[in-house]
Amino acid sequence: QVTLRESGPALVKPTQTLTLTCTFSGFSLSTSGMCVSWIRQPPGKALEWLARIDWDDDKYYSTSLKTRLTISKDTSKNQVVLRITNMDPVDTGTYYCARCRVGAPYFDFWGQGILVTVSS
Amino acid sequence: QSVLTQPPSASGTPGQRVTISCSGSISNIGSNYVYWYQQLPGTAPKLLIYRNNQRPSGVPDRFSGSKSGTSASLAISGLRSGDEADYFCAAWDNSLSGPVFGTGTKVTVL
């Protein structure tokens, strides 16, 4: 059974760095072709893809947010970490991690999401 | 900002058929597969359709997808109250080198 769970702070101040952790089970990021992505959703708005890390440690970022994002993985812990620098109130939203397959741009299992509010 | 455009809402009575459109461009829908996600209230999105018209295991055949040119559609037949949700389309975008999502359509069962 594949499960993913996001963890991190619910509240961050403007200009701070947000660090989110995705802990997963039921698959391994050392398996060829596997990947994990981060996707966010501002309240009442559409989904936005942020970043992806592949089984071979290749990393991909949203072009509009690339300078602020860092994605990494710890295969032994089954975790993927996303860091977003210089947080702003417009970054408020629910952040999801989701499993994907390299070459197949869809997400077959999602975490429950974590709501992050950016406010002073 | 969303690259794919959907109507904000759609509705129907139980048993009816509802269709949701998704409009894109040559760099996304026009060149790549379309995917659809269902997001029930307060929950994470769930993959509903992949590769234009394929259903993952467990998704009823009441849900069907199609694509033509730079547009795609999701049809829900035999509408049920449990189908009330937000529906998002998605596709890879060659220009952005990443997946893009639609603006989302809220389906209401009257």
Image (cartoon, coloured by chain):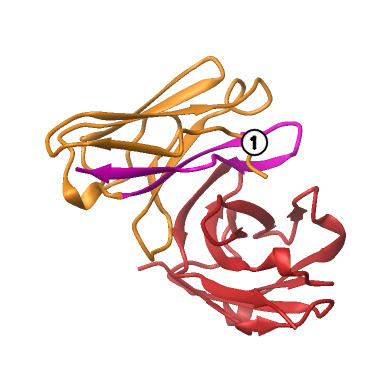
Chain colours: A red, B orange
Work out whether B48 lies above or below A76: above
Secondary element under disc 1, as helix, strand or loop, is loop
Crowd tier of the residue under label 1, counting other residues whose Cα lies within 10 Å: few below 14, some 14–19, many 20 or above: some
- Which x, y percent locates residue A104? 55, 42
Which residues fall within the magenta stretch? B85-110
User: Which chain is mark 1 on?
Assistant: B
- For the N terminus of chain A, the quadrant is bottom left
Residue picked out by circle 1: B3
Instruction: Give the side of residue B96 with respect to residue A21, left or right.
Output: right
> Residue at image x 25%, y 47%?
B83
> Residue at image x 55%, y 65%?
A96
**Callout 1, which amino acid?**
Val
Work out whether residue A65 or residue A13 is closer to the camera in this orientation and state it: A13
> Residue at image x 75%, y 83%?
A120
Work out whether residue B85 or residue A104 is closer to the camera in this orientation and state it: B85
Q: Quadrant of residue B32?
A: top right
Work out whether residue B67 or residue A2 is closer to the camera in this orientation and state it: B67
Residue furthest left in the image: B15
